[in-house]
Amino acid sequence: MVVSRIPPALGGGCLRILTPLLLLASAASLRAARIPAPAACGKPQRLNRIVGGEDSTDAEWPWVVSVQKNGTHHCAGSLLTSRWVVTAAHCFKGNLNKPSQFSVLLGAWQLENPGPRSQQVGIAWVQSHPVYSWKEGSRADIALVRLEHAIHFSERILPICLPDSSVRLPPNTRCWIAGWGSIRDGVPLPHPQTLQKLEVPIIDSEVCSRLYWRGAGQGAITEDMLCAGYLEGRRDACLGDSGGPLMCQVEGTWLLAGIISWGEGCAERNRPGVYISLAAHRSWVMRIVQGVQLRGHSQGRGPAGEGAPSPRGPR
């Protein structure tokens, strides 16, 4: 026989006290359920042109966005939080104080068929890096875009992580780029403008500096730049890909290693793509963007020219 441990004289009073407490706990649980948890960064939730690239699959890169000018694709970018996108500063050359001309399309796989789950959001303002000089090939070619309102995360719209201080990208690290840019110099991405992807290896910084050496101490590759691609050419980012991500996977999570910035031509021999390093500008991004997520190695492991540069976006 089970005997209650509550004395009869106290039982009713305890129940009367417990009932409002349980109701309060239930109300708190309901409130907590209504507050959306931050979406995990760098983890696509799979659903069941870049020169020399291939079609991506739907929702494969849910942080890649189209920065549009007057309704037309202009540059790419990467979603950091529900209110912030990071892209290349040169995408806003001459238009930094004209945010109303721009919008951001999120969750699109094919630009001409973005689908009902995509979201188009206006731009509130743009913050370019204070040392960017607005010259092609300048260091600090990075800008943060504040959206007019917070977007809703879904399997097609998720943030990417930034690399923490444990991340090293040694030469030949295999990373990926994605964008809706030209498939060859002067040849736009054909209908229906499906997001392109391309695997690119990281190139040793000293090798890249020699390839883009201008002579007389005029190195084109600055300390905040990364090079990636193929020395033989044929595969590369191109016009319209500017601002898009250089993405590297570390321990199962995609990190934003760089931003597509510039190069000489598209997919030319010994002229690999040049990217702005997010590791070099991580502290600046974190000062402005609240809630950006960092990821890296769980153990904190360590290491791992002629012609004018052309930006990878509209000139």
Image (tube, rainbow, N blue to C red):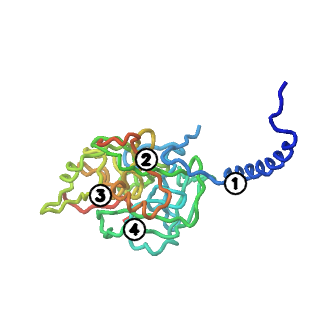
Please tell me in which quadrant of the rendered image residue 139 appears. bottom left
Residue 191 visible, this orientation: no
**Name of the residue lying farthest toward the top:** 1
* Amino acid residing under circle 1: Arg
Label 2 close to label 1 by CB (< 8 Å): no
Q: In percent of the image, x 43 and y 47: which residue is there? A: 295
Circle 1 residues within 10 Å: few <14, some 14–19, many ≥20: few
Residue 42 percent across, percent down from the top left: 48, 46
Q: Nearer the viewer, mark 2 or mark 4?
A: 2
Q: Mark 1 points at which residue?
A: 31
Q: Name the residue under label 4.
A: 128
- State the separation of the CA atoms marked 3 and 2: 20 Å
Circle 3 residues within 10 Å: few <14, some 14–19, many ≥20: some
Mark 4 or mark 3, earlier in chain: 4
Residue 98 percent across, percent down from the top left: 47, 74
Q: Mark 2 points at which residue?
A: 295
Circle 4 residues within 10 Å: few <14, some 14–19, many ≥20: many
Which circle marks residue 224 in the picture?
3
Residue 83 visible, this orientation: yes
For residue 225, side relative to residue 159 (left or right): left
Which secondary structure, mark 4? strand
Q: Nearer the viewer, mark 1 or mark 3?
A: 1
Q: Which of marks 4 and 1 is in front?
A: 1
**Name of the residue lying farthest toward the left:** 216
**Quadrant position of the C terminus in the picture:** bottom left
For residue 280, side relative to residue 117 (left or right): left
Which circle marks residue 253 in the picture?
none
